[in-house]
Image: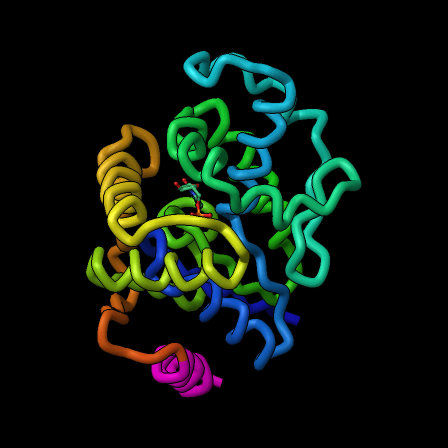
Amino acid sequence: MKTVQIAIDGPAGAGKSTIAKRIAESFNYVYIDTGAMYRAITLKAMRLNLDFDDPDGFGFIDSTDFAYHEGKLIMDGEDVSDRIRSRDISNNVSLVSSYLSVRKKTVKRQQEIAQNINVVMDGRDIGTNVLVNAQYKFFLTASVQTRARRRYKENLERGIMSTLEDLQREIEMRDQFDSTREHSPLKAASDAIVIDTSNMSIDEVVTIIKRKVREDE
Ligand code: DC
């Protein structure tokens, strides 16, 4: 039986993960958050006291085990889902994920995980690089102000202290870095449907995506 792949890309705070999770739940597909894998690699590099400026220091990825279980990321047997959301990780993950050596290893893992299953995968390069043959590709955007507000709310719910101004600045910096990096910069695939979610509720975006997928069933 042919499997279905849905790619959801876009910048930080565009609503990707909430929306991708909802789509996966409603179709009973597996949800894979690829940003979580880059965050977990950053966490492991931090614990190993590695120099983030050295692109050659990430050989440990080859012997690291990653598994997604009920939306949680398990690295080497440890559920790191909460730990990887902290600001020390957020502020270093863009650099780590910009290295070609890191991306090659990570993309390969992601492609292996998505093989032979129905999957909703979110990230920055899913439609352009990881799942180029995905049947459905969506690129979600939103204004920087909207995205900062959403992150602020999320952080409050997680008990993480932050100010709106700091978050907006950090998001702008990450956007700039992610979209101008040399390898797989953040951009919409030419065959992706672009949705600006600034003035839309989660439900509205979910409905649009579900309708598009159902149209073809
Ligand atoms: O979606 P997120 O904020 O958890 O992603 C963390 C970082 O990982 C982000 O700065 C860009 C990078 N990333 C990437 O380069 N490619 C992906 N497919 C997913 C995330």
Majority secondary structure of the magenta segment? Answer: helix
Number of on-image labels: 0
Judge by depth and name the residue closer to the eye, 176 or 90. Answer: 90
> Where ligand 1 lies, by image quadrant?
top left
Picture quadrant of residue 61: top right
Q: Name the residue: 33% across, 55% down.
A: 10
Instruction: Locate residue 13, reporting x and y percent.
Output: 35, 57
Instruction: Locate residue 58, reporting x and y percent.
Output: 56, 19
Judge by depth and name the residue closer to the eye, 195 or 14. Answer: 14
Judge by depth and name the residue closer to the eye, 141 or 126. Answer: 141
Instruction: Locate residue 201, reporting x and y percent.
Output: 34, 80
- Please state if 177 lies on the left or on the right of 134 as rendered: left
Q: Name the residue: 45% across, 12% down.
A: 54
Q: Name the residue: 61% across, 43% down.
A: 83
Judge by depth and name the residue closer to the eye, 59 or 81. Answer: 81
Range covered by the magenta-colored residues: 203-217
Q: Residue furthest right?
A: 77
Q: Name the residue: 33% across, 61% down.
A: 14
Instruction: Locate residue 108, reporting x and y percent.
Output: 56, 38
The structure's colour scheme is rainbow
- Please state if 160 lies on the left or on the right of 211 as rendered: right
Picture quadrant of residue 199: bottom left
State yes or no: residue 46 in magenta.
no
- The N terminus is located in which quarter? bottom right
